[in-house]
Image: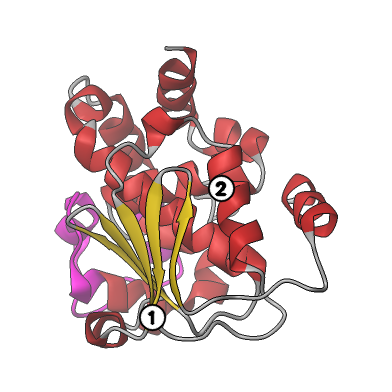
């Protein structure tokens, strides 16, 4: 986090102008469809991402589009990776939000391209399922395993909207975060296997790499292996 903020501080230019239209960064086509809030320098945000990340990690990303998109509103999401493109809402609160969102979606692009290498040995999968079992025990102890979920729900690796809503709305991220300190990097990492990986990937490059090593050691080891290659 400190490294990121320092980068933005040093690159900040009071005369910057966020264009509406196409800009080119790191060989990617970035199209700004709608204006970005004043005080956010989109070039600095994206330059931070691509200056600090090897090309091999985002080679599956062909471009970025920024603006208002119906499917983002439908999902109540700030960003989505789809068919080689990262779609990012222009309604952003801070430069850190943009950086985190873009890196999170890069993780999905990377995972899509390297799913066999990431999951074939099942080390990440087993790590996630072990944490889900602990999560079940914790929530059950506090009488928080309630309809519509049951014990089997905790062993589903794939995204399930019912389970997502249960964690977010019934348990609540504040309570979930308190109960799972040291178990998941953030409550959203408990949602499904893909988000567990993405949560670790994002924090590896933005926040605290040592927290990733502690909480998600198998994801950490896989990322280190790719970087060493």
Question: Taking 228 as reference, is 80 left or right?
Answer: left
Furthest residue toward top: 229
- Please give the range of residues in magenta: 134-163
Residue 229: image quadrant is top left
Q: Does the magenta segment cover residue 214?
A: no
Give the x, y percent position of residue 4: 72, 50
Q: Does the magenta segment cover residue 136?
A: yes
Give the x, y percent position of residue 35: 51, 86
Q: Is residue 194 above or below residue 34?
A: above
Q: Is residue 65 above or below residue 155?
A: below
Of the numbered discs in the image, which one, if any, rests on residue 33? 1
Q: Is residue 19 above or below residue 82?
A: below
- Of badges 2 and 1, nearer the viewer stands 1
Residue 76: image quadrant is bottom left
Question: Taking 60 as reference, is 210 left or right?
Answer: right
Task: Write the residue at 32% across / 36% down.
Answer: 59
Q: Residues within 10 Å of mark 2 (few under 14, many from 20)?
A: many
Looking at the image, can residue 163 be seen? yes
Residue 65: image quadrant is bottom left
Give the residue pinned by disc 2.
Answer: 49
Closer to the camera in the image, 115 or 211: 115
Task: Write the residue at 35% across / 34% down.
Answer: 127
């Amino acid at each position: 986090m400190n490294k990121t903020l320092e980068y933005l501080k040093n690159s900040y230019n009071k005369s910057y102008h966020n264009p509406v239209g196409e800009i080119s960064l790191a060989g990617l086509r970035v199209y700004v469809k709608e204006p970005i809030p004043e005080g956010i320098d989109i070039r600095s945000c994206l330059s931070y991402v691509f200056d600090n990340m090897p090309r091999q990690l985002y080679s599956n990303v062909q471009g970025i589009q920024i603006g208002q998109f119906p499917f983002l509103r439908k999902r109540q999401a700030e960003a989505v990776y789809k068919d080689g493109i990262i779609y990012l809402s222009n309604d952003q609160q801070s430069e850190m939000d943009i950086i985190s969102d873009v890196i999170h979606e890069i993780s999905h692009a990377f995972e899509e391209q390297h799913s066999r290498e990431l999951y074939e040995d099942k080390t990440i999968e087993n790590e996630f399922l072990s944490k889900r079992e602990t999560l079940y025990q914790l929530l059950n102890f506090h009488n928080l395993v309630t309809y519509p979920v049951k014990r089997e729900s905790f062993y589903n690796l794939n995204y399930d909207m019912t389970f997502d809503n249960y964690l977010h709305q019934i348990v609540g991220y504040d309570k979930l975060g308190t109960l799972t300190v040291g178990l998941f990097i953030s409550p959203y990492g408990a949602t499904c296997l893909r988000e567990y990986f993405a949560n670790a990937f994002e924090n590896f490059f933005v926040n605290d790499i040592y927290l990733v090593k502690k909480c998600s050691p198998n994801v950490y080891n896989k990322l280190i292996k790719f970087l060493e290659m």
